[in-house]
Image (cartoon, grey):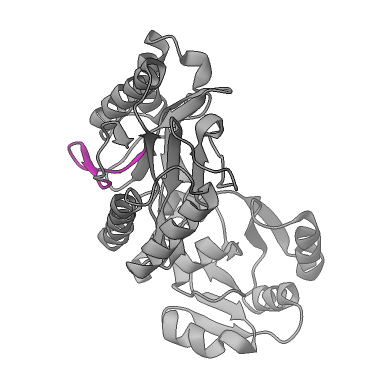
Amino acid sequence: MKERLVRLRAKMSEKGHEALLISHPVNRRYITGFTGTAGMALVTDRDAVLVTDFRYVTQVKQQSPHFEVYRHDGDIFQAVADLCRKRGLKSLAFEQDHLTYGEVEKLKKSLGDIIAVPTSRVVESLRAVKDEGERDAIRKAAAIADRAFERILEELRPGRTEREIALRLEFMMREMGADGASFDIIVASGPRSALPHGVASDRVLEKGDLVTLDFGASYRGYCSDITRTVVLGEPNDAQRRIYETVREAQQAAVDAIRPGMTGKEADRVARDRIKASGYEKYFGHGTGHGLGMEVHEAPRLSPRGEEILEPGMVVTVEPGIYLPEFGGVRIEDDVIVTEDGREVLTQSPKHLIVIQ
């Protein structure tokens, strides 16, 4: 955590921030190591304080050795303002993406003459490149998801509901050591597989269905995110055609991932192949996104993805085709950008799995 604090101070200096208030729970955990549910971190170029209440004082001392703990018994913004005044601060940057309008107004009132400076994605920019410990946690989360997929194939059959399959997936992942699912599990079957975010419903699986499973494990604060699409019974020609189109586009994009390319360039690899097959209008989302403590973070692999991929970044690669009232296919892997290319974490098979 000390190294992260050093990097944060360098970023603050680059942006001209005298002090930064970290309110977003994920950013707070990343910088401090504190896993509690209440508190804010105040970082200056000289010191670092974690402001929390009675419940977490001991926990902060255990988890955040590089931070002074400051217990507040009243309004937390007033406590932050008092700390700023004691340090003679003239300004305080705050995370504009993570405070409500009402909270910002309360902060400004508490600060008085101290200037409140809105800032964005300071900590998130540091989180985009993962260290070895973070990459190991994501590797473990991906391995858990792979094993869960292998096991769930034994239970996929007509007559089961999407919700039952989703519950079984989460149970399996927890049984394997996951803290839980990294997001609401998507199980979308038949016509519902044309819904990119078709969270599991009470629909009963039927013979002939395409079934899309999009899920991930949370492990020690880090996420995995995998998607596979299978078919119940012998697929028809249209199902095979869209499946092979997605599989080829997804594999081409995975193979193209390398440091120095932009998210836009990675997206174009998959999008161009889907366009060449005539399905361009049925692929309406980005090819992928960053993955880490949150399931969606920087960088973006999309037509607007200007970020340059760097070694240590972890991204998903997940093109899809979605035909309304027919069904859809999505295939997704988790990929680490390495010094000379990529490391693919999710290893579940990507050929069309036919469940008889």
Residue nearer the viewer, 151 or 179: 151
> In the rendered image of this protein, does residue 247 appear above or below residue 36?
above
Where residue 161 appears, as percent x and y from the top left, is: 52, 48
Residue beneath the point at 40% across and 34% down: 318
> In the rendered image of this protein, does residue 354 appear above or below residue 156?
above
Where residue 320 appears, as percent x and y from the top left, is: 44, 28
Is residue 345 located in the magenta-colored stretch of the structure?
A: yes
Magenta residues? 332-346
Residue beneath the point at 36% across and 71% down: 2
The picture quadrant where one finds residue 86 is bottom right
> In the rendered image of this protein, does residue 56 appear above or below residue 340?
below
Is residue 117 located in the magenta-colored stretch of the structure?
A: no
Residue nearer the viewer, 218 or 82: 218
Side of 71 relative to 151 (left or right)? right
Where residue 128 appears, as percent x and y from the top left, is: 40, 49
Viewport quadrant of the N terminus: bottom left
Residue nearer the viewer, 106 or 234: 234
The picture quadrant where one finds residue 298 is top left
Residue beneath the point at 76% across and 78% down: 75
Residue beneath the point at 27% across and 24% down: 252
Q: Is residue 300 visible?
A: no
The picture quadrant where one finds residue 113 is bottom right
Residue nearer the viewer, 72 or 145: 145
